[in-house]
Every structure is written in structure tokens, then in C-alpha cells.
Image: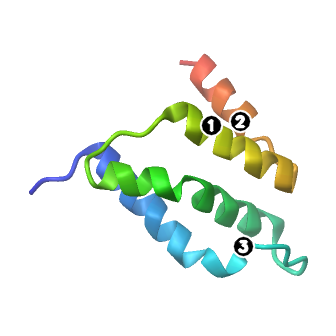
Amino acid sequence: MPATQEQLLAFALYEIRLLLAHYLGSGEDTDPSVRAAAHLAYALHNQASVALQGGEFDPAEAISALGAVDRLLETDFQERLASSLASQ
């Protein structure tokens, strides 16, 4: 069965989440960018799983998950997503 673009990207995100799982939490000795990547992948892994199975998810819930990461790590994923979408 051929994969869709969404399924390929979802697979990659899900695998990245698995690879970075041990960087979740408050480990202060972890590189901040690795920690941010781990939390970003974790925040969206449920949506990635749904997409991988060919289903659909609520983008607003995914964006809300980005906001949770932003608040936890003082990142700006929501803002950067909005900027990326605005520049299309």
C-alpha cells in the first residue's frame, strides 16, 4: 500500500518522538534545542498516530498542544507556525 505525504511525515514525527523520549522532563543538563524537539514531537505524537492510520485530527487541538510546549519551555512554536502560514 502506498503511503500519503501526510502518513510519511506523521511516521517521521512519531519516530522522532520515540527517539527523543528520554529527553522529556526537566533535565537541565540537556541541550535546550534537543529538549524542545522532544517536547514538540511528544505534543504532536497523538495526531501523528492518527494521520499515520489515515485518520484526521483537529488542527486546533494540535495548535493548543504547541501552546502548552511554548508555556513550558518558553518557546514560540505557535507564533512560528502562524508566521509560516501567513507567508504562504
Residue 43's place in the image compared with 62, above or below, is below
As measured in the structure, the alpha-carbon distance from the residue carrying label 2 to the one carrying label 3 is 19 Å
Q: Is 52 displayed left or right of 70 in the figure?
A: left
Q: Is 59 displayed left or right of 26 in the figure?
A: left
Residue 11's place in the image compared with 55, above or below, is below
Q: Residue at x 25, y 47 (%)?
A: 54
Across and down, in percent, residue 22 comes to 66, 81
Q: Which residue is mark 3?
A: 24
Callout 2 environment at 10 Å: few (<14), some (14 to 19), or many (20+)?
A: some
Residue type indicated by callout 2: Gln
Across and down, in percent, residue 2 comes to 13, 53
Q: Which residue is mark 2?
A: 78
Q: Which residue is mark 1?
A: 63
As measured in the structure, the alpha-carbon distance from the residue carrying label 3 to the one carrying label 1 is 19 Å
Callout 1 environment at 10 Å: few (<14), some (14 to 19), or many (20+)?
A: some
Query: What kind of element bears circle 2?
Result: helix
Dot placed on the residue nearer the N-terminal end, 3 or 1: 3
- Cβ atoms under marks 2 and 1 closer than 8 Å: yes
